[in-house]
Amino acid sequence: MQTAEVAIAPVIKVILKTDAKALDEVVVTAMGISKEKKALGYAVQDVKGDKLTQASSSNLSSALQGKVSGVEISPSSGMPGASSKMTIRGSRSFTGNNTPLYVVDGMPISSSTDLDTFNSVTGSDYANRAVDIDPNDIESINILKGQAASALYGMRASNGVVVITTKSGKGARKGKPEVTINTGLSFDKVSTMPDFQKEFAQGFNGAFSPSDSRSWGPLISELANDPKYGGNTDNSYTQKFGKHQGQYYVDQRAKAGLDPWATPRAYDNAKDFFNTGVTWNSSANVAQSLDKGSYSLSLGSTTANGIVPSTGMDRYNAKLTAQAQLSKNWSTGFNGNFVYSKIKKQTGANNGIMATVYGAPSSYDLGGIPSHIDGDPYTQ
């Protein structure tokens, strides 16, 4: 906007002129080539790095959710380090791969979901390479949509391209180094739980069976009167240990070395199973722009404990980028990136831990009876 002093007059003519600077929006495309957005023949959308770190996300996929139109991101699970499926403008194939190509600082990488399944009976999620990228180290992301956007990458980019530009120090101030420190702490909690029946005990056809995973047994309130395991009735256990009024015999507790007599009650196994997930992100970046070059050094660490016990992720990132302008026509640069990640997950599908938790009868104390018993090969 420009201001000008004019003389007082009955009529004042005001002429609006276009600002050419507002039209020079630059987009990073294939092979690191920068073009004006208006000169592109395909749709593109960009996300700045500061938008990705607002929610302190530990991985790129969750940081991008809800920030790009036409892009669907579906995580495989809520565990730390879980792989995510990204599709741009919907799926193009029923059987083929619909994942876009990721390009980090000009280098194409594969980020397809790596799942190992066996007839849907067992399954393991080995994550994908998107979990190795620290959102704190990203300067900008350009989403290239449509097949025309992938002309320089070939068929592997037919589903679109995610161009990631990391911090390089080009935009840093000259003179003293610019130091940036980010840290974030987030908590995860299960928001909604399914409703479970809490009237009938484990068993089948109205009969109590402590080794049955079905909940078709007698009423939980009547377990103390069960003819075989009840502490109020005459049976082999009360003849051996005496009567225990208001209780019933649990064979699994006896094998674990616990008091085998329990008071009938309905347990909230699913609610007691989940933890409060804690994620801690921290990163530091030192960048400086020189007369004929720039450099950027980034260090980052992420520690995440999942809502599912024995799940979590530890990730350590280190990246060094340096560039120098040797002459008017020659320049050189270096880009080194080191990532160490250790991810602990639970198996999925029918033999996963969640099938056990959700399928456990309400009368069974899933958290109170140890699942590991020394010397018993079936409880290891």
Image: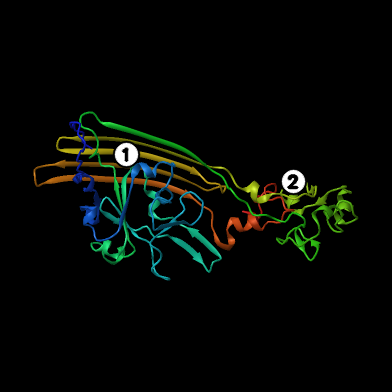
SS for callout 2: loop
For the N terminus, which image quadrant? top left
Q: Is residue 63 left or right of residue 369?
A: left
Marks 2,1: beta carbons within 8 A: no
Q: Residue furthest front?
A: 10
From where the camera sits, is residue 377 visible? no
- Residue 164 place in picture, x, y as percent: 31, 50
Q: Residue at x 56, y 49 (%)?
A: 308
Q: Residues within 10 Å of mark 1 (few under 14, many from 20)?
A: many
Q: Pointer 1: what residue?
A: 298
Outermost residue to the right: 234
Q: Which mark is residue 308?
A: none
Residue at the spot 21% in from the left edge and 56% down from the top edge: 39
Which amino acid, mark 1? Ser
Q: Give me the disc on residue 258.
A: 2
SS type, badge 1: strand
**Front-most of residues 98 and 373:** 98
336 versus 103 height, above or below: above
Which residue is located at x 72 percent, y 56 percent? 197
Residue 59 horizontal/vertical position (percent)? 42, 48
Residue extending farthest to the top is 176
Q: Along the line of sight, which residue is nearer the eye, 101 or 215?
A: 101
Q: For residue 16, what is the image quadrant?
A: top left
Taking depth in this image into account, of 356 and 291 the one nearest to the observer is 291
